Every structure is written in C-alpha cells, then in structure tokens.
Amino acid sequence: MDSDIDTFADRYATVWNEPDPELRRKRIAELWAEDAVECTPTSEYRGHVELEPRVTAAYEQFVAGGQHVFTYPGGAVAHHGAVLFPTHMVPPGGGDPAWTGTVFVLLGEDGRITRDYQFTDPSPA
C-alpha cells in the first residue's frame, strides 16, 4: 500500500510539471474525477474544465521558464479513501524549496480525486 500511495503522490506532484498540453489533459483526467473540486486558501476549481487551466497556469508561471519543478519528497499517509502528503516547489537542480505545501485529497471508488485541498505551509520563523 505504501508504494501505491507514494506513486499516487508522485503522479500528483509531477502533473504540475507536464509541458505537453495533451499529456497534461490526460494525466488530469487520470488523477481527478470529472466533477472533482480543488480548494486552495483563496480559490475553488470545479471539474476538469477548471482544473486544466489551473494546472496549466501553474506550469506556465512556475515551471515553463525553468525556474522550478514540483516534487513529492515522500511521507504520504492514507486511510479510508483519504491521502495526505507534502509537496515542494524547488529549483530544477535541487535545493531549498521556494514553496512547501500539504495536500489532502479524498478519493472516489475508482481511485481518482473527488476533493482536493491544498495548504501552503507556513515559512519557518
């Protein structure tokens, strides 16, 4: 089960790095249910019709220029259809994260995300 959770969390993190629009669309459909909802502290995205532009915008803003990549550093936990895991945005060659988040998702019967909550972790003092 741990490797399945880790594989899932890694797929989630890497979809934000996908440069090919068609492959990105396919991976979004594989990860999120058609009517999934993603919530960030400031916004809500409903269904693939809103998730695809959201993932694309993040790719264009943070990854396309070569400044960052999104990674899964390990540490996912899961039970009863819920998964909790960290994500980082780091320089492509590695280094300290420019952003760290925690993702909490609820999965449907088919293993795809139905609810997705992203939290930005506070910076260390």
Image (cartoon, helix red, strand yellow):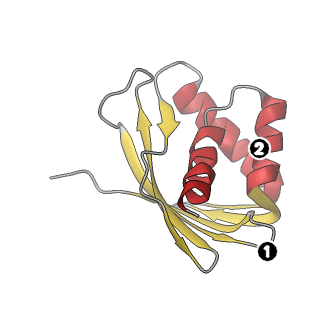
Q: Which mark is residue 109?
A: 1
Residue 125 pos. (x, y %)? 15, 52
Q: In which quadrant of the rendered image does the N terminus lie?
A: bottom right
CA gap, disc 1 and disc 2: 18 Å
- The reply to whether residue 91 is visible in this rendering is yes
Q: Which mark is residue 27?
A: 2
Residue 105 pos. (x, y %)? 60, 67
Residue 13 pos. (x, y %)? 57, 44
Disc 1 + disc 2, Cβ < 8 Å: no
Tell me which numbered mark, 1 or 2, is placed earlier along the sequence: 2
Residue 112 pos. (x, y %)? 75, 63
Characterize the local packing of mark 2: few (<14), some (14-19) or many (20 or more) Cα atoms within 10 angstroms: some
Characterize the local packing of mark 1: few (<14), some (14-19) or many (20 or more) Cα atoms within 10 angstroms: few
Kindly identify the amino acid type of the residue bearing the numbered disc 1.
Glu
Kindly identify the amino acid type of the residue bearing the numbered disc 2.
Arg
Q: Secondary structure at mark 2?
A: helix
Q: Residue at x 47, y 28 (%)?
A: 68
- Look at the picture and state if 13 lies above or below 106: above
Q: Name which quarter of the figure residue 120 lies in.
A: bottom left
Is 22 left, or right, of 84 in this rendering?
Answer: right
Q: Which mark is residue 62?
A: none
Name the outermost residue toward the bottom. Answer: 80
- Look at the picture and state if 16 lies above or below 35: above
Q: Secondary structure at mark 1?
A: loop
Q: Residue at x 56, y 31 (%)?
A: 61
Name the outermost residue toward the left. Answer: 125
Residue mark closest to the camera, 1 vs 2 = 1
